[in-house]
Image (cartoon, rainbow, N blue to C red):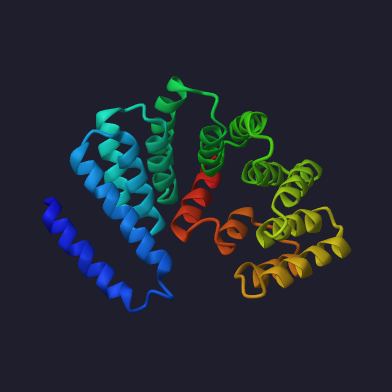
Amino acid sequence: LTLSTIFTKFLKRVGQLHSLRHKNKICVEQVCCFFSRVCRIQLEPENLDVMFKMGMQYLRNNSEDPAFAMFGKALSYQSSHQQSILAAGSIMQAHGDHDVALNKYRVAVEGCDYNGCLWNNIGICLFAKGRLAQAHSCLKKASFICPLDYKINYNLGLVHQAMGLHCSALHFLKAAAELKRDNAQIIGAMAVVLSNMNDINNARRAYEKSISMEPKAEVVSFLIEIVKYKNVNLILVLMRSGCLEEEVARRMQEGLRQN
């Protein structure tokens, strides 16, 4: 595309949004920001940071294919570009391509292994493959680098729960809940652990709190079933709570059965 063609499309899009400017102020700003990056990448076709930011903009708009293509383009210029590796690897993970994602992450580790986000993603890949001890090790390293990241603490809680270490799981989930107080998903995971520890009263309180925080969450009905039957399937909890898509959850279940 030439700059004139892009600019024409840009003006057309802004015109469509202008009549709804009160409701779509953010959308207009996003279009302007995106256009500026398109112009910049036309002028600086080898600018990796611009490629990465454009890819992230696509990703925020749920356009995975162009986002992945942009990250791939950045990696074609520099195969060790960490931000692009992490973003591309996350897309691969979402589609269950854990082995391919791990291969990408190995390249990133060689460049810089002091990255909490990177070790968190590696840990989740290994967890999906049922390699719990290795996943635990990677997540502990991620926690050492980024001790105040609630997602890492949450993932450590899930891994400990899968390993049957309920007290440790509760410890990390509590830490995650302290760091992210408005997250019903974390409270729901705590309820699962408490029900596994036969602490039904506190489990019920946790379920009720989770429901009050997100009354329309898909996790609610499933969590109630866990209390009723005391039948915990961590992968399904992740899937129903919106953490994982169905395809990822299915592959994770297959990986756990194989191991």
Q: How many marks?
A: 0
In terms of image quadrants, where is residue 228?
bottom right
Instruction: From this view, report whether residue 213 is shown above or below residue 122.
Output: below
**Residue 181 visible in the displayed image:** yes
> Residue 224, percent across and down?
72, 70
For image coordinates 21% across by 69% down, the residue present is 12
Instruction: From this view, report whether residue 31 is shown above or below residue 136.
Output: below
Instruction: From this view, report whether residue 209 is shown above or below residue 155.
Output: below
For image coordinates 53% across by 44% down, the residue present is 128
For image coordinates 85% across by 63% down, the residue present is 200
> Residue 41, percent across and down?
23, 42
Front residue of 73 and 217: 73
- In what quadrant of the picture does the C terminus appear? top right
> Residue 237, percent across and down?
62, 59
Q: Residue furthest top?
A: 110
Front residue of 247 and 42: 42
**Residue 97 visible in the displayed image:** no
> Residue 190, percent across and down?
75, 55
The answer to whether 75 appears left or right of 181 in the picture is left
For image coordinates 41% across by 40% down, the residue present is 89
Front residue of 192 and 9: 9
The answer to whether 116 appears left or right of 18 in the picture is right
